Image: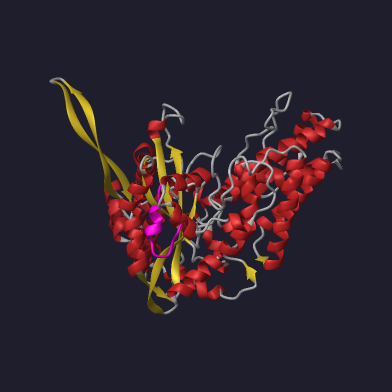
Amino acid sequence: MESEDEEDNDEEEVADVITMPQEDFPIDPQLSPMEQMLKNCKSFGEKCFEKWLKFSSHPDATVKCASLSCDFMLNAALDVIEICKPFLGEQNATLVLNSINNAIKPLQSQHLRMQYLKSEGYFVEPKPYTIDYENVNIRTAEGVHLDQRKATVSMPSIKESLLAVLYNEELSNALVMPSDFTNVTQMTHPFCGTRTQDCLAALGEDFLALQLFMDEFTTTCPIGSKSTCYKMAGCYVRLLNFPVDLLSKLDHIFLCFVAHASEMMGELQIQLSKTVIVELKWLETHGITINYRGNRRRFKVILSTLAADNLGIHQLGGLITSFSSHNVCRMCTVTAQSLKGMHALDPNDEKTVAKYEEALQNIDDMWAYGIRQECSFNSLENFHIIRNITVDIMHDLLEGHFQRIVPMVVRDAMAHGYTLRTINNAIKAFQFLGPDKQNPPNTITLPAHAPENGDTIKMGANEMMTLIKLLPLIFRFAGIRLNTPIWQLFMKLQRILDILWAHAIDENTTAMLDQLIQNYLRDFHAWGGNMTMKAHLLLHYPRVIRQMGPLRHLSSMRLEAKHR
């Protein structure tokens, strides 16, 4: 009986495999068999194209692999027709074969596929821009001679990228405008902040706002990821007019430029002024015209904010890139030494546009004010680096301050009788669910004795987010009970995190956050915590929220995912 049941189950499984998915090729009773077949062939070609695009977008796929997979898929379809020829008959088989060939004609080579992408508006081709020349010695059979090598940046048009995406009226009609968030009491979107509302008042009309992100990354290279000659500088833009559920979609983050970091970063402000700034100036003056909720409307496009890690923001802003001396904060005049015991801000120390412009007149004042060279983005009508107060919870906290507070908690638990092995076993034994299961934290490694400047641990942003959020539960399920000052400090941090990751924040909550951060940093320093630049930035978070909205929408976590 068991064998019969097994055979029945096998037959059911086979039947499930060969069942034709009706929803892929729905039958229209109003069409003739010939019309239905032609419609199905067209749908088949579109599905093949979608599968090729999906395969091509995979981070591990090369152009050649994607091309081969598409060729195999198309050849398999033609082979199926040959297999069915005895059943269809010569005439019908030829008819189906010709219909399939016509449907897949744009897919039959890599060149045709790229041409089809361009013709349909799905691909904005990057254009090379020469940014510098370098004299190099070339060795040939005739000897050594001097040659000139171009340094180029590859840059798709921001305008064309926006038009290509917003040509889809479902997306263009879904856009939200700054005026939609005027006088709101709860901040739920970047447009709720005073930065956007001030621009709206100055322009007198709605506009499209961009966030620009820059980062350096390494490409796949046999020499290894440390090979700096293969390091690239990548820049992306994101349209902030999307509703919050679409803001983090990778499809809505567009490449702005890519270049060799060694060629781009040396004179970044000059290179930006030759390339990106030129198009941004044109966009904020002329704008773009799109279909928006039944009308053809022209919107100016302005740069709202920059995003990057701390080093990247200082590079983009033309600020000094040393965080161990002089003025190290882009938002106030604190020095590396004075921030060590700071747990409250003096409003008089906030940087202003007027003082920035005054400092530019004297080289010594520039250095004291943290300026390396004038920011090229200041040449835009609606942007100034001092008004671009921005932070990044990914780099400041997940890959920054949290990597110091977690070892403090672990050391504290060890001092109260719990071994590091017990703590790591608790992390490994915890049942993570949902998204947390995809990013479980690593076990923690600490030296026998804490360094003078405090312990740090290395953990990815997603893994650290899981750990910091669930560590109280991990300890509880493992029977680790603490009621020490450092554990109470960690609980204060949990209250802060609830606000920082909130989807909606009002003024009362922001004011409470200000006080919570001051109390937390005071206790952190009192219990031996090492105050760093990233911990200091927490003090600016309430002000940034008021000007830029919830911080979750400023994070570069999704922007960095675009590298893949």
Where is the N terminus found, in terms of image quarters? top right
> Residue 398 at what x, y percent from top left?
63, 44
The part of the image, by quadrant, that contains residue 349 is bottom right
Q: Reply yes or no: does residue 459 show up in magenta.
A: no
Q: Is residue 539 above or below residue 531?
A: below
- In x, y percent, where is residue 100? 32, 56
Residue 285 place in picture, x, y as percent: 34, 68
Q: Is residue 157 above or below residue 526?
A: below
- Residue 374 is covered by the magenta coloring: yes
Is 481 displayed left or right of 186 in the figure? right
Looking at the image, can residue 470 be seen?
A: yes
Up-down relation of residue 132 to residue 122 (above or below): above
Residue that extends furthest to the bottom in the rendered view of this protein: 294
Q: Pick whichever, 201 or 260, lies toward us.
A: 201
Q: Residue at x 45, y 59 (%)?
A: 384
User: Which image quadrant for residue 189?
Assistant: bottom right
What residue is shown at x 61% (from left), y 64% (from top)? 546
- Most common SS among magenta residues: loop
Q: Is residue 563 in sight in this rendering?
A: no
Tell me if residue 506 comes above or below residue 356 in the rendering: below
Look at the image and give the residue range highlighted in magenta: 373-385
In this rendered view, identify the residue nearer to me: 180 or 173.
180
